[in-house]
Amino acid sequence: MTGYPSRIGFAEAGQIIRQVAGNRMLGPERIAVTRASGRVLVEDITASLPLPPFDNSRMDGFAFAHASLLPGEDTLLRLAGEQFAGRLQAMQVGAGECVRITTGAPLPAGTDTVAIKEDCTLHDGMVRVPAGLRPGADVRRAGEDVQAGARVLADGQVLTPARVSLAAGLGIASLAVAQRPTVAVFTTGDELVEPGLPLAPGQIYNSNRELLMGLLRAEGLEPTAWPTLPDDPERMSTALADAAAAFDVVITCGGVSAGEKDHLPALLAARGRIHFWRVRMRPGMPVLFGEMDRALFLCLPGNPVSSLATFLTLGRALLDGLQRRREPRPQWRAVLRAPWRKTHERLEFLRGWMESGDDGRLQVMPNAADASHQLRAVADSNALIVLPEGARDYSAGDVVDVIGC
């Protein structure tokens, strides 16, 4: 198995994934705005109308022409009608008159200012408006949020609920988004038993499948879990070939190192192509990236912490590239709450708990259980602390990069 990068740096691995995924980007599809949250936009959106589309009241109260007010004293205005939110009434408010108005209602002709309901008094059809109101008080002007013709959303952005709301507010009924990749998930190993079944000596429960399925669902995907693959190269090859012909991405867990039962590297080399195998990272060093038939393969190590770290860093990069996402994933800077000795040269993703301190700064506590098989350490963590290549001692108070998990 030669002819591909091996034991490469993490940055190079990410670059290879982005390049390969960029050449295999999924096509667009148009979907209803009601189903667009979480998808990646593949068009620019330009406002066809201003927001707000008309001058309207910011509060419940009374609308009038500011020129009707007496300088420096309260003013009595005749109540000439009402304008509620909805269709604009055909009325002209004259000098010395006002209309009752509700929040969001369009300003009737002849009005330019609103007095808040609680600041006014109404008696016998006359409204007392307090002194000191500025022209245009409590009025939301047309276009003060968005001007017609402005670009409001961009190709490659993730459609958050707020962005979808903005599109809906502009009257857009459908959006062009990247297709979501289809993903097959395999766990491997003769030792794996499904939860709920009895364990024989030497067996363990299959926890990694639920880890990966949950991570993929959190990405808005609908992954397909295949039966556990035995440590049999022929049966493994048949199942993976079937998946490779039907899915965009195949994610495997286990069977990717250099042991007697780790058949995946040889299988991918023989039937497909390996883009890289082994990355200078901890945990997750044996991770493999390749392809077979129509599918891209991301083969993760079997230890649960390794699976988590490689998926959050390299797996997300693969999914983002296929879906044309241009926005970077959130990453934070936080203060270490405890010292840490890094004794190896590889880039490390250390488990930890991140929260805001009393001073408002983000801080992160390393989890002392740092071995790659310790699933409890994953369950007790909400972040990965990024420690760059090179051995060194970290002190409490040092600032580090942090990835949420």
Image (spheres, grey):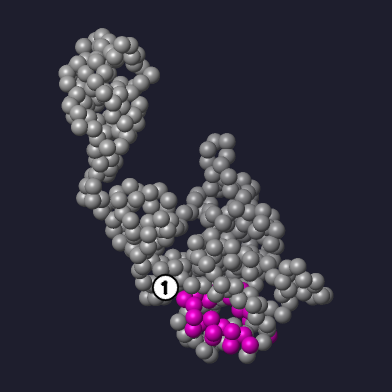
Residue under the image location 23 percent in, 51 percent down: 48
Residue 227, quarter of picture: bottom right
- Out of 101 and 237, give the one closest to the viewer: 101
Residue under the image location 24 percent in, 15 percent down: 78
Start-end of magenta stretch = 235-260
Q: Residue furthest toward the top? A: 73
| Percent x, y of residue 208 | 65, 68
- Circle 1 — which element? helix
Label 1: how many Cα within 10 Å (few below 14, some 14–19, many 20+): many
Residue under the image location 37 percent in, 56 percent down: 33
> Relative to 247, does residue 65 appear above or below in the rendering?
above
| Percent x, y of residue 17 | 45, 72
Residue under the image location 47 percent in, 76 percent down: 248
- Out of 120 and 165, give the one closest to the viewer: 120
* Whether residue 358 can be seen here: yes
Q: Residue furthest toward the right? A: 201
* Whether residue 345 can be seen here: no
* Residue located beneath label 1 in the image: 21
In this image, 403 relative to 96: left or right?
A: right
